[in-house]
Amino acid sequence: MISEENEKIPDSGVLERISERIVSSSYVQSLKNVLQGEKKIAIIVDGPNILRKQKTKQIKLDDIDAIVKEFGKPSIKKVLLNEFASKNLIQAIINSGYEPIVTPYDIYITMAIEVMKTLNQNKKIGLFVLGSRHARIAPILLKIKEKGIETVVVGFETGMSVAVKKITDKICFLDIE
C-alpha cells in the first residue's frame, strides 16, 4: 500500500527566485539567443582590396561594422594584409577591434586558411561576413555554405564579381559617396 505524505510546497517568492536564477544563467541565455535567431558572426576582410580610398572616401572598418551591426554582434573580426602594410594601418586595425593578419602569401589563400581554421575551431558560427569583391572568394563562399552557414559579402558595387553576387546569401555595398 502506498502511503500519502504531506509535501510542503515552497512559497511563490522562493519559486520566483529559483526561476530568475535559471533564466539568467549563461547556458539558458545562449539557448535563448539561438532560439531567437542570434548567431555567432565571423568577419574576415581582404584588407588590400577593401581598406582603400574609393572616389573621395577612405573606407574604414567602422563602415563594415555599421553594416554587420544589423546582423548581430561579431565574435571574430580579422583583417588580412600583405607584407606592404604600414605600421600605422596595423595599429588602426587593432584600434578598431580587429585582429590584423599580415601574410607574405596570396591574400585569398590566407583567407581560405583563416576561414577553414575559424570553421573548425568555432562550431557555433552561424554567419560569415567576407569583406571583398574579388571572384577568388567564390570557392571560399561555397565551402562555407557547404557547412550550412549563412554568408554575407561586403564590398563595392563597382567591380563586384558576378560569381560572388550569385553565390552569397546577401551582399552589402559600402557607401563610397
Image (tube, rainbow, N blue to C red):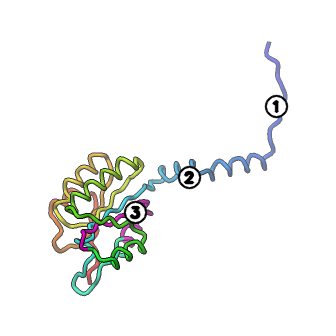
Q: Which class describes the residues within 10 Å of circle 1: few (<14), some (14-19), or many (20+)?
A: few
Label 3, secondary structure: give it: loop
Question: Is 17 drawn above or below residue 74 in the view shown?
Answer: above
Please say if the residues under marks 2 and 3 sit with CB atoms less than 8 Å apart: no
Question: Is 33 drawn above or below residue 11 in the view shown?
Answer: below
Does the magenta run of residues contain 69?
yes
Q: Position of residue 142 (x, y in %)?
A: 22, 51
Q: In this view of the protein, which residue sits in the foreground, 123 or 164? A: 123
Amino acid on which disc 2 is placed: Gln
Give the magenta range.
Answer: 65-84
Q: Which mark is residue 7?
A: 1
- Indicate which disc, 3 or 1, sits on the residue closer to the N terminus: 1
Which quadrant of the figure has residue 101? bottom left
Question: Is 115 drawn above or below residue 175 in the view shown?
Answer: above
Which quadrant of the figure has residue 167? bottom left
The quadrant of the picture occupied by the C terminus is: bottom left
Amino acid on which disc 1 is placed: Glu
**In the image, 169: left or right of 164?**
right
Label 2, secondary structure: give it: helix
Q: CA distance from mark 2 to mark 3?
A: 18 Å
Amino acid on which disc 3 is placed: Phe
- Indicate which disc, 2 or 3, sits on the residue closer to the N terminus: 2
Q: CA distance from mark 2 to mark 1?
A: 32 Å
Q: Position of residue 20 (x, y in %)?
A: 68, 51
* Residue in view at x 40 percent, y 47 percent: 123
Number of the front mark, 3 or 1:
3
Number of the front mark, 2 or 1:
2
Q: CA distance from mark 3 to mark 1?
A: 49 Å
Q: Which residue is mark 2?
A: 29
Q: Which residue is mark 3?
A: 71
